[in-house]
Image: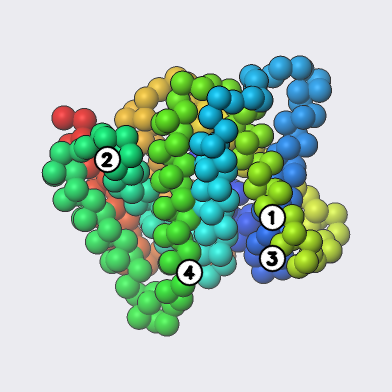
């Protein structure tokens, strides 16, 4: 789980760097193409690795692919304008949204106290956002981050529906192929030729990072429950802050740190109440 979160953070940082030179459909399309190339390349060397490619639930996988695409687009557009740490604070509301979806679709109603902690968590996000918005920051960027978070919550909910259908190869194929086909015409019309080998490597690295993170996540959930793994997600904030400082020299402000403490505390309490 820690490996997956680290890879996702590097993926987001790399995408943020690429956002200044390339359009989002092109960047995400190349990510999907590289993931597919790695999948079939590895399976050519070791046939059957990662399990079967077929599924008994194609509609759910297609919905999951659409949600993953929405999440990738949302965070790509958001992180062009706001620091990673602030974008990740919005992302930390995903457990609350997942809880709401589970109550609505899976009939898994949490205790009332859990909803109270949800409200506290969203308050923490508002605390972190306030200085940026007062300074003229883009409300649209936070909106894109929230869109990406909502889509990610849909992915988590569908993962729970598909928990009895194991296999990492299936997950990569059914997320990368439909998303790539949807993005192809948009990437084609707005294609910007990569400047050189370094840019090609940076674009291809997104596919390697995304594929590695997907495999790590699948491995994590095979060995531990969601309840045990969920607290580890907060390590992503450490990655975000380190990358913000190391690459862009952006130190988190007091409001970001206070908001982070509120959101993390609310998530921990919500999960504790839900388990009781």
Q: By what rule are the colours in the image chosen?
A: rainbow
Q: Is residue 220 left or right of residue 259?
A: right
Q: Nearer the viewer, residue 21 or 254?
A: 21
Badge 2 vs badge 4, beta-carbon distance below 8 Å: no
Badge 2 vs badge 3, beta-carbon distance below 8 Å: no
The reply to whether residue 31 is in sight is no
Tell me the crowding category of disc 2: few under 14, some 14 to 19, or many 20 or more residues within 10 angstroms, Cα based. few
Q: Earlier in the sequence, mark 2 or mark 3?
A: 3
Judging by the rendered image, the residue that carries numbered circle 4 is 141
Q: Earlier in the sequence, mark 3 or mark 1?
A: 3
Could you say which quadrant of the image residue 34 lies in? top right
**Marks 2 and 3: which is nearer the front?**
2
Tell me the crowding category of disc 3: few under 14, some 14 to 19, or many 20 or more residues within 10 angstroms, Cα based. some
Could you say which quadrant of the image residue 172 lies in? top right
Badge 1 vs badge 4, beta-carbon distance below 8 Å: no
Judging by the rendered image, the residue that carries numbered circle 2 is 103
**Marks 1 and 4: which is nearer the front?**
1
State the image coordinates of residue 109 (x, y, percent, origin top left). 21, 37
Q: CA distance from mark 2 to mark 3?
A: 37 Å
Q: Earlier in the sequence, mark 1 or mark 4?
A: 4
Q: Secondary structure at mark 2?
A: helix
State the image coordinates of residue 148 (x, y, percent, origin top left). 48, 55
State the image coordinates of residue 57 (x, y, percent, origin top left). 53, 29
Q: CA distance from mark 1 to mark 4?
A: 21 Å
State the image coordinates of residue 262 (x, y, percent, origin top left). 25, 55
Above or below: residue 11 compared with residue 211: below
In the orientation shown, which residue stands out farthest toward the left?
A: 112
Q: CA distance from mark 3 to mark 1?
A: 11 Å
Q: Earlier in the sequence, mark 1 or mark 2?
A: 2
Judging by the rendered image, the residue that carries numbered circle 3 is 23
């Amino acid at each position: 789980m820690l490996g997956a979160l680290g890879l996702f953070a590097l993926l987001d940082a790399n995408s943020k760097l690429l956002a200044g030179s390339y359009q989002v459909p092109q960047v995400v399309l190349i990510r999907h193409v590289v993931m597919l190339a790695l999948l079939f390349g590895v399976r050519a060397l070791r046939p059957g690795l990662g399990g079967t490619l077929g599924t008994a639930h194609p509609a759910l996988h297609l919905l999951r692919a659409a949600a993953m695409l929405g999440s990738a687009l949302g965070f790509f557009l958001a992180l062009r304008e706001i620091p990673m740490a602030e974008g990740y604070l919005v992302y930390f509301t995903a457990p609350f949204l997942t809880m709401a979806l589970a109550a609505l679709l899976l009939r898994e109603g949490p205790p009332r106290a859990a909803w109270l902690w949800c409200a506290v968590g969203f308050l923490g996000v508002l605390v972190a956002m306030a200085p940026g918005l007062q300074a003229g920051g883009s409300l649209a960027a936070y909106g894109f981050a929230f869109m990406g978070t909502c889509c990610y919550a849909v992915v988590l909910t569908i993962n729970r529906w598909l928990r009895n259908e194991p296999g990492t190869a299936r997950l990569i194929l059914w997320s990368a192929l439909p998303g790539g086909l949807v993005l192809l015409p948009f990437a084609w019309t707005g294609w910007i030729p990569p400047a050189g080998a370094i840019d090609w490597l940076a674009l291809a690295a997104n596919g390697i990072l995304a594929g590695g993170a997907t495999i790590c996540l699948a491995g994590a959930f095979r060995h531990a429950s969601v309840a045990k793994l969920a607290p580890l997600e907060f390590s992503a904030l450490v990655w975000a802050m380190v990358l913000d400082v190391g690459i862009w020299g952006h130190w988190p402000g007091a409001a970001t740190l206070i908001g982070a403490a509120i959101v993390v505390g609310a998530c921990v309490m919500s999960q504790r109440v839900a388990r009781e």
